[in-house]
Amino acid sequence: PTTTTTTTRPPTQEPTREPTTSSSSTNRPTTKVVDDDNDNTNVLLPPITYQPGNFSLGHRSDDGYIRLSNGLKGELIAQSGEKVSLVVSGKLSKETFHIAPDGAAVFEKNDGSDGGWYYVSNSENITVGSNWWNGGVGAIEFNRQGQVVNYQRIASHTRNNCGGGKTPWNSWVTCEEAKGGKVYQVDPTSEHPPRLTEMGGLGAYESFAYDIYTDPDRPKFFVTRDAHNGVVTRFTPNEQGLECYQKTTNDYDRWCTLEHGTRDYLLLLIDDDDDGTSSSSSSGSFVWTNDRSAAQDNAYQYYNHTEGIDSYQGYLYFTSKKLFRLVILDLKDQT
């Protein structure tokens, strides 16, 4: 693995409410470029005016709470404890927007309509129920013009829903960051009820990722845990799970991929430094083990309180918030 260490500082101003904003790029004039076919054909493409991390123009969301990079604008579209304004109908949503919005993702509509998307977000509150102040998951629906069409809760009777992630079949995985917490799949459209996965078992779950690059025929799935000995768990579908994964009739038929398989745990094998210790080394290898206790001790030493996780082209990335550390795993070479 490769690790990097960073330092952080607290924000200069803490917001007093929990807005959800919609951001978009602005001011995109066209320019001429030559296409990739080397046939000297000029193609008109818009230049990129969005400049990540450049705040020189002082842009903020319309409520003033969020600093925005140059080229973005932000609009307040939902507020905890209030009904959501539905731009298309001119009405308010039937349900109240949930408390403590946390981990989120965007899902493209695949329902045969004229386009649009769902913004799905968790509610990180410890109370259980179906009210707006309880844990769960909510979804804001947009049309193709980016206008709010609807808002509804799509998961209730869960608690402290923190992070999560998208699956290859377009379900949302929501993680309960609580003692005995579980990991569920949720339908962004609310057509199907939430279903419990077999990825959990330890509680305090944070975020979810998958790898279908290293071995496309045998996908792997991962969850992190925000705890002092919070191991990274790998879930491997068994033959029944792989049958689910390979189904092509519809996305929902593939949900059972995460309901049949085995779990093992990350064990980092860190190279020694010149002084014979591995306390600050940033290289080594890793294995996956069934010895949960050993993996928990290893996590406490090298990557406790893990948060976000993602994979890209065979590499797995996750963070340890207590150690200010980014861990990068080469899943093919196991380094």
Image (cartoon, rainbow, N blue to C red):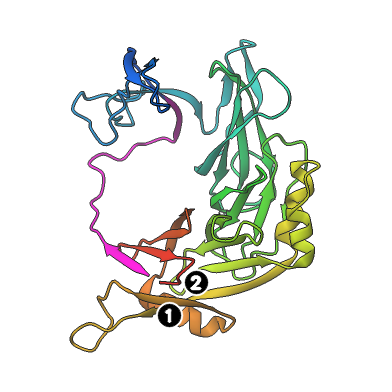
Q: Amino acid at mark 2?
A: Val
Q: Position of residue 108 (x, y in %)?
A: 61, 31
Q: Position of residue 85 (x, y in %)?
A: 57, 18
Q: Is residue 321 above or below residue 296?
A: above
- Image point 29% across, 34% down: which residue? 52
Residue 185 visible from this viewpoint: yes
Residue highlighted by disc 2: 231
In space, the residues marked 2 and 1 are separated at their CA atoms by 8 Å
Q: In which quadrant will I find the N terminus?
A: bottom left
Indicate which disc, 2 or 1, sits on the residue closer to the N terminus.
2
- Image point 77% across, 66% down: which residue? 239
Magenta residues (range)? 1-23
In front of the other: 130 or 66 = 66
Q: Is residue 257 above or below residue 274?
A: above
Please check the rendered image and state whether residue 302 is part of the magenta-colored stretch, yes or no.
no
Residue 260 circle label? none
Examine the image and state in which quarter residue 134 appears. top right
Magenta region, mostly helix, strand or loop? loop
Residue 298 circle label? 1
Callout 2 touching callout 1 (CB < 8 Å): yes
Q: Amino acid at mark 1?
A: Asn
Q: Position of residue 76 (x, y in %)?
A: 44, 24
Q: In which quadrant will I find the C terminus?
A: bottom left
Q: Position of residue 9 (x, y in %)?
A: 23, 51
Secondary structure of residue under mark 1: helix
